[in-house]
Image: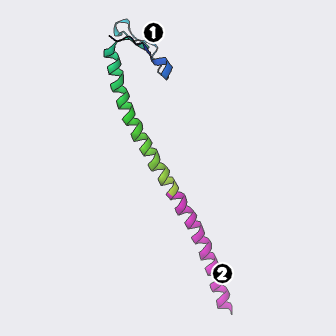
Amino acid sequence: PFYYVFNLTAYGIYIQPWKYPEFWNVQETIKTQARFKIFCSAVKTAGSLYGCGLGGAFLVDIGLSLFMVVMSSYNTRLKLLKELNDYKQAASIR
């Protein structure tokens, strides 16, 4: 027998059962083992989606870091080219 009442509002899942028709039997608590199995299968799906989202966030972070490295090296290159041009002009004047 399943003696546990699993309240979904404790985990930030607010269903608002009064918005659904009466025959749907929507509740904010899980009182049967069958509904608990359905909820656990939904959590498995959410876990894999969270993993994909986390991996995507890491890829975006790596991309932004590489972009900052490229932009800073481009800025350094521009400064170096300006100094080289100034040196060439100074050498050609002599």
**In the image, which is nearer the foreground, mark 2 or mark 1?**
1
Judge by depth and name the residue closer to the eye, 77 or 48.
48
Residue 3 counted in the magenta span: no
| Vertical order, 57 against 1 (above or below) | below
The residue indicated by pointer 1 is: 18
Q: CA distance from mark 2 to mark 1?
A: 76 Å
Q: What crowding class fits label 1: few (fewer than 14 Cα within 10 Å), some (14-19), or many (20 or more)?
A: few
Residue 47 lies in what quarter of the image? top left
Q: Is residue 35 left or right of residue 10?
A: left
Range shown magenta:
66-94
- Tell me the residue at 52%/55% (across/down): 65
Number of numbered callouts drawn = 2
Location of the N terminus (image quadrant)? top left
- Tell me the residue at 35%/26% (across/down): 42
Amino acid of disc 2: Asp
The residue indicated by pointer 2 is: 86
| Vertical order, 45 against 51 (above or below) | above
Residue 75 lies in what quarter of the image? bottom right
